[in-house]
Amino acid sequence: MFHKTSSGNRIWYQLQGSGTGILIIHGLGGDLETMMPVAQNIQGNFTKVLVDAPCHGKSDDFGITLEDLGSELISLMGSLGFREFYSVGISLGSIILEEMMLDHGEHMTKNVLISPASEIDSVVVNKVASWAASENRVSADVLSEGYLATHRMEVDAYDRDHPMKPERLYPLIPSLMDFSVRGRHSDSGCLLLVAQHDSIFGERMIANLRETFRNSRVILMNSGHAIHRESPLEAARIISEYLGSEFLNK
């Protein structure tokens, strides 16, 4: 199904299940299908709203600020009957959700940020630039060495089926360059799943994230950046426990 933005562009989304709404957003270069291994294993009575971000999947290719994109996703969730909802996002998806929590936190009660960023710094810019200049296979940068060594055929197949397409991403990139949570605050409930072997965002982002998202808890995962690929069942188990309990108060 498509959500039409105020500018006339289309954002593709797909629904699963019934119950409390969960907005689920993939990472840079992915699409909603890449979140299925996690989404399908989140336990509970939930309506899972999986979205293709602009310039990804079946959504149109168009430029939009993070603030305006957040407003559009709030509108989408409202049109589905969810004035308040939960959320799960990885990498780019976590950035989108962070901006939404900062701008529209009253609508977002429990949020899971997987491999989250506190800002787009030179490390991230250089990494993305290297992908744009490469053969568009990024698994070596987003998976841990241990996983790469033991899942080589699976990784190669994934790279063939999901090549990075920088030319599609160009309209969206400018809106990401100035992203930062420094000096900003949100009281929305927040669980940060941070990968111990993440060379893109990783543990160096934790302090700023904790300062901004004051009602947050951090769990370190033995994974590379792409937790949703490397540890989907473990991530889904943790998310299910968090969404179904007073997890942050324990």
Image (tube, rainbow, N blue to C red):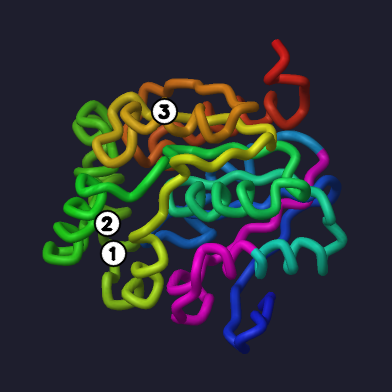
The amino acid beneath tag 3 is Ile
Instruction: Give coordinates of residue 59: x percent, y percent.
Output: 53, 76
Q: Earlier in the sequence, mark 1 or mark 3?
A: 1
Tell which of 110 and 242 is nearer to you.
Answer: 110
Question: Depth check: 208 or 217 in front?
Answer: 208
Badge 1 density bin: few <14, some 14–19, many ≥20, Cα 10 Å: some
Q: How crowded is mark 3: few (under 14 residues within 10 Å), some or many (20 or more)?
A: some
Q: Residue at x 37, y 77 (%)?
A: 171
Instruction: Answer whether residue 58 is magenta in the image.
Output: yes
Identify the amino acid type marked 1: Pro
Segment tinted magenta in the rendering? 45-70
Q: What residue type is labelled 2?
A: Asp
Residue position marked by numbered label 3 in the rendering: 206
Mark 1 vs mark 3, foreground winner is: 3
What residue sits right under mark 1 in the picture? 163
Chain-order first, disc 3 or disc 2: 2
Q: Is mark 2 on a helix, strand or loop?
A: helix
Q: How many labels does the image show?
A: 3
Cα separation, mark 1 vs mark 3, equals 29 Å
- What residue is drawn where x is 21% and y is 57%? 137
Residue 159 is tagged as 2
User: Where the C terminus falls, by quadrant?
Assistant: top right
Using the numbered discs, state the Cα–Cα distance from disc 3 to disc 2 in whole angstroms: 29 Å
Quarter assignment of residue 182: top left
Please name the residue shown 41% across and 41% down the image. 118
Let me know if residue 217 is in the magenta part.
Answer: no
